[in-house]
Image (spheres, rainbow, N blue to C red):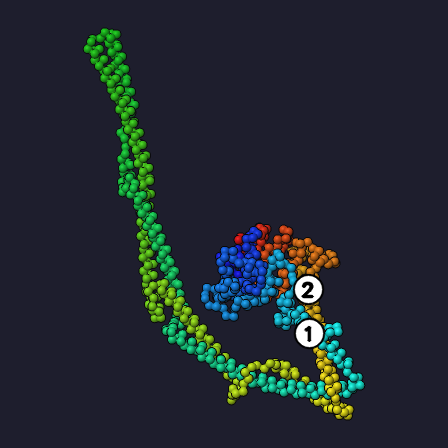
Amino acid sequence: MQIRHMTATFGRLEQAELTLQPGLNVIYAPNESGKSTWSRFIRNMLYGLSTHDRGLSADKNRYAPWSGAAMRGRMELTADGADYTLLRETQRANAPMGAFSCTYTGTATPVPGITRENAGEQFLGVSREVFERSAFIGQAALAVEQSSELERRIAALITTGEEDTSYSDTYDRLKKQLNRRKHNKTGQIPALEREIAGLDDTLAQLEELQAQHRSAGQQVKLSETHLQELQAQQEQWAHWELAEKRQQYREAVRTAEKAQDRADTMAELAGTLPDDGTLARLESRHTALLRGEQELNRAQRDAEEVSAGKAAADDAYRAHPLYPADEAGLQDRLRNMTAPEPSGPLPFRLSIIAAVCAAAAAVLSLILRWTPWITAVTACLCFLCTVLAIRQRRTHSRILRQQEEMAQARDAFSRQIKAYLPLRQAAADTSDAEAKAKGLCDVLRQRQQEDLRSFLSELSVFRSAADLSAAGQALNELRRQRDALAEARQTAQNEALRRDLLAQSLPSGSSDAGEPAQRPTMSRAQLQALLPQVTSNLHATRSRLDTLTGQIRSLGDPDDLLSRRAQKTEQLTGLQAEYDAIAMAMDALNTAHLTLQNRFSPALGARAAEIFSAITGGRYQGVLLSRDFSLSAEPTGDASQRSIQLLSQGAADQLYLSVRLAICDMVLPRDKAVPLILDDALVSFDDERLHAALDYLLRESETRQILLFTCQTREQTYLAGRENVSLLTL
């Protein structure tokens, strides 16, 4: 069994929730945070809250909700491969958590046979007392105590499997009966002995013969009556078994008719249903259509993303200053961006030389006193050459500036072209991608519509549906109806087969007259064993009675004194026989109990020793248990025994825990996988032994769920990252 989720209004918990996992659950919370409350809540959810306890320590008072709300709880668990939900609520103030329900999880269907009284035993396989003394472990409740319930469970495990007998209870009852008959000088037997001692010894022989005669006569009558009762019981058994068979047959006939009527009714209500192959094919097509719808949705999302990308690319393309020019036109514009070439340095130099020559000629004409007009001409030439040189220089500088500006303009235009052409190409590419994506969507949409029309047409033979969702619901309904119809038909077939088998076991021509209303009190095995014995005893007592009759007649008629003495003797004989039988039973009970102890205690001690040695790192090698569960430990390499009272608190807690875990291994049913609940059970452990105990619990969690409540963080630190471990904090 595994606890999956709990909701509690219990003590300090107010609508508190706790989700658990399989394996080892380490639940950390500081003191007074609700650890013990949760553990008590689990026990009371499984076994119920006792309303007979009184005082503040009673759970109904101790864990009354602090908020004043009604006590209630919900537990979701898994057992025997099914999920169950337990709900305990308070409908009356004097019966907290008295309202109980157990349903299959996710449904309102009650689980048959589960009641508020037997829920714990049904899911865990043990009584509340056995659970508390084995799997319910707390720091203040580690000690192992003897109890009649645990005693019955242990006896059942090593004997017949019956759990209705306790050695302690039986021994106490026998002892009371023994003391009632004789206890020192008191009791029924000594009283009779004193009465008989007062009778006249002279009448002892006659009185003894008369007592024996009466005893023999009574034994004959008892034997005859007993024989008649046994014979009547034998006949009654034959009639009762026949009546039981007839009753079972009648019930089987009614059950078979009801099952067949139910199957026929379901077949009529279901209408036309597809066969398994057709239904499986329709379900497969429905699944394929769902995948196709998902694929179409993905394609549409992809197309929307492509369209968004195209819009962004177009916006960037149109926003560029060169839009919508093509690459060839841009390259032509780039090539046409040229500046005039300068004339070069030669004309400028020639104009300078000419100006120098003209100036030299003018100076020479002044020196040589040439004619005025020659001097004037020379001066004019000099002036013209100088003006020409200056103009040539300015023109050359202007052309150089134009070339530099044109070069800068070409560079800027070239950069614009480089940025523009990728935008233009991206716009073209996204247009192609958008066309492809939309084409794919159209193809998928058309194919999906065709497949859906074909599928709905095929499905309409059995159920009409307007869309794919309705088709899924129709298929689920068809599958449910078909499964329910198949189950009903199989049930009807099984009940009919059971009816026919019971009919074959009935004798032909028998009637119901004279059938007993009740089952015989004695079993057939007892009848077969007692009939020969009673018959033999009857013959022996009759022979003895005849002998005593002859002896009494030879002695004469008895008087009142003899009659009274005979009665007392008879009573004394009976009481003494009972006393001896009870004493013998007590001796046999002691012997049997000692045998059980000798068989169980060594096995329990050996298992506890294994666990104790593992926890203590091999410090101790043996564990000894007495009849009343007193404990002693044997240190490794030391033949002495140390009582648990001589151990330290930590070692004593570790020994108690080892015995508790050993009892869990041997007493708890393995098929139930009873969860272990530990409430601060490891507080007194040092780090080394704590780690060893946690390693053992981790191994144990592979076969059962374990809930470890702790107020320390050592457990979580050590187990962090381990598999099969869930770390929780309240």
Circle 2 sits in a helix, a strand or a loop, which is it?
loop
Q: Which mark is residue 628?
A: 2
**In the figure, residue 262 lies in which quadrant?**
bottom left
Q: Is residue 348 above or below residue 17?
A: above
Q: Position of residue 630 (x, y in %)?
A: 69, 61
Q: Residue at x 68, y 64 (%)?
A: 628
Q: Residue at x 80, y 86 (%)?
A: 202
Q: Is residue 719 above or below residue 576?
A: above
**Does residue 265 appear anywhere in the picture?**
yes
Instruction: Please name which of the two marks, 1 or 2, marks the residue nearer to the observer.
Output: 1
**For the view shown, which residue lies furthest in the right direction?**
202
In this image, 63 relative to 261: left or right? right
Q: Which mark is residue 454?
A: none
Other residues around mark 2 within 10 Å, as few (<14) / some (14–19) / many (≥20): few
Circle 1 sits in a helix, a strand or a loop, which is it?
helix
Q: Is residue 529 above or below residue 49?
A: below
Q: Position of residue 261 (x, y in %)?
A: 42, 78
Mark 2 or mark 1, which is nearer the start of the sequence?
Answer: 1
- Residue identifier under label 1: 177
Q: Amino acid at mark 2?
A: Asp
In this image, 93 relative to 218: left or right? left
